[in-house]
Structure formats: structure tokens, C-alpha cells
Amino acid sequence: MRVRIAVTSIAAAAAAVLVLGGCSADEGDTGDTVTVVYSKTNSFTVLDDLMQTAKKEFEASHEGITVELQPITATDDDYKTRLQLSLASPDTAPDVFYEDTFNVRSDIEAGYLLKLDDKLGSWDDWKMFDDAGRTAGQGEDGSTYALPLGTDTRVIWYNKDVFEKAGISTPWQPESWDDILAAAAQIKSSQPDVVPFNMYAGTGTGEGTVMQSFYELLYGTGDGTGLYDDDAGKWVVGSQGFVDSLSFLEKLYDEGYAVSPDKALDPNVWQAVFGEWFPKGTLGATVEGSYTPSFWAEGGDFAWPEYADTMGVALFPTQDGQEPGGVSMSGGWTLAASAQTDVPDLAFEFMTTVVNKKNALWYAINNAQIAVRTDVAQEQTYLEANPFVEAVTDAVSVTHFRPAKSDYPQVSVAAQEATEAVITGQKSPAEAAAAYDDAVREIVGDDGVVTG
């Protein structure tokens, strides 16, 4: 899952919906067109290449059928807003669309997604998808509503040159949060112009704040329940681990180990991370996704031939080094069909074209994805795609997934707001955690929470 968020204008998004989606009801539907909506930005063109390839393959094997690609040039948050507005009406809903796993449950509940169960039984390739991939598009009813494109993990990416100048030997693997702070202090002391250890915070980077930062802390506290207590079926409040995680971010920012708060709140800070700071040796480390090499590889938007020799990877440690010793987070994106589509069979067939073995292998390699097809995961070209494939795949053994609940998107925003309040000095960690607890109770009700 690429998590790149920016604040968007609902009014602008609403206007943009007019250019999305399938035929309007009064135009009629001849059944010869499949409309496909997906995200495309200057730094994310791989999906567009995949869709262009799938369009050619599909039209060649389906005479008289046209695939109408409708890429949306927008940040993730803007894309999701525009997609949600288009799905709300049969006049604008596309037949097929690119869907973040964290929106699947809420969109199922809203009635936006087509149930695929009756089609999967006759699709032989479905058995080639691993268990995690198969469940990514499931609803609470156990039915499948979306097909996985790939998944990811989060690890620490660090610049070996910066670390070695600070007297820190590489390969480097911190065993606890204190090890991270100690390394950051060494870097700051030896190289004052370098940002020692960046972790995203605030609402500017949206889901990136929680997936590439806060959750690595929270799920490594030993608190046992993280955001959601599966056994109780309730959201966790009153968590000491939540306070401890905010306290770590507070120290990281207050000590000047991370970027300044104003830079942290910039939705485009990630571009500086990939395109400037790491290549120029002005950033020691950050927590980011397994897809990171796709930006630096030949043809990437921030092509950096030396990245393979300069960069290193480490697992994010648990708070005090307790088992299992490391923490990661996984997400992913899927393809779904609209419940409003007039061409459900063609929509499903196009989706299966996109995720067939050949296309899935190409996408996993070129977008630095962790493969969800077992046959792709065994391909030598995939295993040799970049020097970090093995390391980021190993992180699967300690990974966590966001709660697959329709309330999650609102809870996520509350967590982002807590981090922002702390790094800007508006609230202490305890106060920000208390505000988060109040927000969660407001979202799900008193009966929907349990004290951690």
C-alpha cells in the first residue's frame, strides 16, 4: 500500500466526479465498454503501465469490447475522496476500480462493491493466491469483494554512509527504542546538518503517519491489543502503550532527531525523503514501506543508481526488545467491481487479466510489491528484483494489519491527530491519548470500547 496523503477540497472533489465512472442511466449501456478508475501521479505511474497492458490483452481477447481507462491524477487521499463520491451514484460509478484494503470493509457496508463469490469458483488462478491475499478483499460475511494486487511491509531504511560517519557499524539492527535514540544522538553529534531518524507524524501525511510510524511503536509496546481487541470485538482505549508511543515521538521531535514539525506536516515530505535527503546523505534513517526501491530503481521518479550500495534495512524493534523482537505493518491495494456495474462478468474478467501471473509478476517487480500469488513469489526474477526483497519479505513474520472494520478510517484520523498534537506541543502524550480515547468513544460509542 503506498500511503501518500494530502488534504483535499470536497467541493473540488465533487466537481471532479463528473468526469468519472460509467455511462449515465439516460445514455444507456451497450455492454461493450468496461470503465476502469485508478490512481496515477508523477511518482506513481507503474499502475498506469499495468492497466495499459491489461487493456491491450483484454481487448485482443474480447472482440468488440472496449476498456476505457480513467486514471485520476491525485494524491491517495484525494483519489479516495473522488472515488467515494463517484461510487455513490450509478451515473458515475466505474465498472472496475483501484481500492485500498482499508476502505474495503466500509465500502462493502455502503453497498458499493460487487460480491465475487459466484465468479471465483470457476477461476482456476484463485488457488494461486496466498491466504493473506485472499482475505484482503473479504467482508465480515466471509464473502470476497476485491482481488489483491500486492501487499507490503514496513522497515527502517538507513543510509550506511551517514551511520558509518557517526561511528555506527553496519549492518545495523536496533534491539529497542533506546537503541534508536542512541543512534540518533550519535548522528546528530557527528553531523549537525543531517536529520538523524525521521518518523512521520501529523495529519499531513495521513495514513502514512500511522502505517509508517505510529503503529510500529504501538504494536511493539507489549500492550497486547494494539488498536483493536479481537477477542472483545472492541476498540482499545486507556492504553499505556498508546501513551508510550506518543512519548517516543515527542522525544524524537523535541530532541531534533526528526524533521521540524512544519516539515512533518507537509503532505509532500516523503518526496524529500526519497528524492533529496537520502541520496544527498542528509537523512540517517526513516521508517518506510517495502516498495521504497521502486522510487530509486532505473526508471523510478527518484532514480538513484547508488541506492543498493548506500542503503540498509533493519526491522523496527519492539519497545524493550521483547519478543518477537520486531514490528512491521502491512496493507495493500486491490481491484474491485462496482455493485452498480451493468457488465459484471466483463468487469471480473478484466480484473483477472490485470492480476494474471504474467502481469502480477511484472507489477511485483516494477512496483517493489510483496507478491500475493505463490507462483509469482517463487519466480527467480522476482527474488532477484532488488537487493532488499529478502529482507522486506522477512518482515512478514512480525507484521500486523490494520483492523478490518468500517470504523477504522475515522479511528486512524484520531490517531494521526494525537501525533500532531504531541509534535507541535499542543498536548502532552497523556493529554493527546485521552483526546484520542474520547474521539474513539464518539465514533463507536461507549459499548464499542474496552480499556487496555
Image: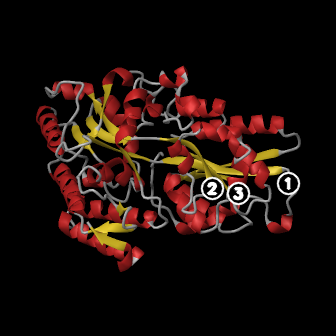
Residue under pointer 1: 31
Decide: few, some or many residues near mark 1? Use Cα within 10 Å; few <14, some 14-19, many ≥20. Answer: few
Given residues 446 and 22, the one toward you in this image is: 446
Relative to residue 366, is residue 122 drawn left or right? right
Decide: few, some or many residues near mark 2? Use Cα within 10 Å; few <14, some 14-19, many ≥20. Answer: many
**Can you say whether 11 is above or below 346 in the image?**
below
- The residue depicted at 42 percent of the width and 58 percent of the height is 403
Relative to residue 385, is residue 279 drawn left or right? left
Q: Secondary structure at mark 2?
A: loop
Q: Amino acid at mark 2?
A: Tyr
Q: Secondary structure at mark 3?
A: loop
Residue under pointer 2: 145
Question: Tag 2 or tag 1, which sits nearer the N-term?
Answer: 1
Q: In 3D space, how far apart are the residues under numbered discs 3 and 2 (Cα atoms)?
A: 15 Å
Instruction: Determine the image quadrant of residue 407.
Output: bottom left
Residue 256 in view of the camera:
yes
Q: Amino acid at mark 1?
A: Gly
Relative to residue 272, is residue 44 drawn left or right? right
Percent position of residue 93, x then y: 70, 61
Q: In 3D space, how far apart are the residues under numbered discs 1 and 3 (Cα atoms)?
A: 13 Å
Q: Are marks 1 and 2 in contact (CB under 8 Å)?
A: no
Q: Tag on residue 6?
A: none
Percent position of residue 213, x then y: 31, 49
Question: Tag 3 or tag 1, which sits nearer the N-term?
Answer: 1
Q: Amino acid at mark 3?
A: Pro
Given residues 342 and 257, the one toward you in this image is: 342
**Can you say whether 308 is above or below 401 in the image?**
above
Residue under pointer 3: 94
